[in-house]
Structures are given as structure tokens and as C-alpha cells.
Amino acid sequence: MKTGSIGYLCKEGVKNIWINRLMSIASVGILTACLLILGFAVLITASLTSMMKYVESQVEIIVYIKDDAKKSDIDEAYLMLNDISGVTQVEYITKDQAFEEFKGTLEDEWVLDKIKDTHPIPASFKITVEDYAEISQLEQAIINLDIQENYRVPTDFAETIVKIRGAVNSFGLIAIIALVFISVIVISNTIRASVFARRTEIGIMKQVGATDNFIRIPFIIEGAAIGLIAAAFAYILILFTYPQLSNVLGVNNTLGDSLFFEGLINTIIPLEDKKGELILYFTSGGLITGIIASVLSLRNYLKV
């Protein structure tokens, strides 16, 4: 295709946007809203995933060790637990260390004096895991330990975390599919209006030998341009709104002053970490949606 033809087709595509400017503005507005929601869905899903990982890291699995357990057996169990998939840390707490931790929670000196020589607090392993979906393997290994006297594994909590994570991922996928579907319908109607207004011209062009691609390209350019404009607006809006939302959550934290909630808030994904990903999503999403909508709108009008 000649350079002059390409210039002509691009000019026609841009002219279509101006001719049907009201419909084009509506398409840009709706697609911008869809892309903006998509952007927030990506950021919120990433932040929720980060928060859940933080919560997982704060919940420890405790294995209480028998008082008569041999040091060699304890060392062997320590190495075995460390080798289990998903385990990020195993900390051995001696009886004396456990008693020191207990003292910090008990203010009654009389009780401390009574139990300091024969305190019943056993040694233990504190285990943290990377993924609670694999906790069943760890629990089975703990059950089979000869040196364990008792253990505490938050199985119900783990199942809840896994379900929440699955629900978040499913919601994100459904939201993306729904938004793409809505955007395709809206832009299709806009392009269809352009095609309908030029239906006689298209018929004449077909009669004189114009190819389908020659007729199709201006409308594809129109759809792609609408998609890119919407992507630019969505990106600009999210640049201003998301940091403000993050600041509100960080400064006006109503969940309390505890270190846990402070750490939870700090796991919110900053926009800087997702800028490149958002640009890719917005640009590709806008372009692909616009092009698909254009192609769908032209199917019937090219049958002359």
C-alpha cells in the first residue's frame, strides 16, 4: 500500500471520530470508565494478595516438643521441617526461651516465683509458611513426628485464606471479561453509526473495485484511536486517584495503632510498582477492544 493511501486512510479514520463526535465522546467515556475499573481491579487484587501473604506470615504454626526428646531427634526434626515445600522458616524455642516469653505476658511475680523452677512450658518449633494451600503436607509431617507432644495448625484459617485468594482471582477475571464485553458493544455501536452514515459511499466503493481491507482500515483506525484516547484518560485518572486513596488508608487508619495493622497497610501495592503493567494493560486493552469492535461492526456492510 502506498504512503499516500495510508495517509488518506488514517485521515478518514480520524475524520470519522469528529463526524460522530457525540457517539465518540460517549465511547471514550465508557471505555475510560471500564479501563479505570480494570486498573483498580489489577491494583486492588495485587494489594489483597500482598495483604494475605502478610497475614499468612504473621500466623505461626506451633509444634510443642516432649520434655524427654533427644537433641539429635530435635535437630533431625528441625532439618526435616525446613525441607518441606512452602515452609519459609523454622525457629526452635527452648524451654528457657519459652518461659522468658511467658514472663512478658504475666505480671504476677508471685506466680512466676512459684513456677520458675518447674515451669510446664515446653520447647517448641515456630513455623511460618509461604503458601497456606500446602499446609496439609506440613500438618501430616508434624503428626508423624515422634518428638511432638502437641501442635497448633490453623487449618480453618488456611482454608479461609485459600478460598479468599481464589475468590479474589475469580472476581478479577470475571470483571475483566465483563468490562471487555461492555466496551466492545459500546464501541461497536459508535463504529456502526459511522458505517451507517457512509453506507452509500461504501457501496459505491465496492462497485468500483475497492477491497474490503481498503474500506475497513479507516474504521479500524477510528476504533483504535478511541481505544488509545480512552487508555490515556484512564491512565491519567488513575495516576491522580490511586495515590490519594492509598494516602487516606495510610494516614487515616481506623483499624487501630497495632503493629499488625500498620504492617498490613504497608503491604498495599504502590502505583510505581505497577505503572509499566498498567500502561501495557490500558494500551493493549484499548487497542484490541477498539479493533475488535470495528471489525464486528463492518461485517454486514461489506457484503455488497
Image (spheres, helix red, strand yellow):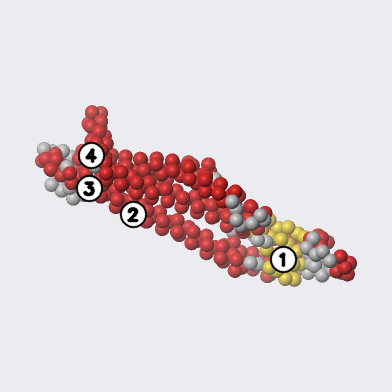
**2 or 1: tag closer to the N-terminus:** 1
Say which residue label 1 marks.
Answer: 63
| Distance between the alpha carbons at the discs numbered 1 and 4 | 73 Å
Kindly state the secondary structure of the residue where label 4 is placed: helix
Say which residue label 4 marks.
Answer: 19
Nearer the observer: mark 4 or 2; the answer is 4
Nearer the observer: mark 2 or 1; the answer is 2
Q: Residue at x 20, y 45 (%)?
A: 195
Location of residue 206 with respect to 48 vertically, above or below: above
- Is disc 2 surrounded by few (<14), some (14 to 19) or many (20+) residues within 10 Å? few
Location of residue 247 with respect to 155 vertically, above or below: above
| Distance between the alpha carbons at the discs numbered 2 and 1 | 51 Å
Relative side of 129 to 36, left or right: right
Nearer the observer: mark 1 or 3; the answer is 3
Relative side of 265 to 74, left or right: left
Q: Position of residue 296 (x, y in %)?
A: 25, 50
Q: Residue at x 61, y 68 (%)?
A: 155
**1 or 4: tag closer to the N-terminus:** 4
The residue under label 4 is which amino acid type? Ile
| Distance between the alpha carbons at the discs numbered 1 and 3 | 67 Å
Say which residue label 3 marks.
Answer: 192
**3 or 2: tag closer to the N-terminus:** 2
Say which residue label 2 marks.
Answer: 181
| Distance between the alpha carbons at the discs numbered 4 and 3 | 13 Å
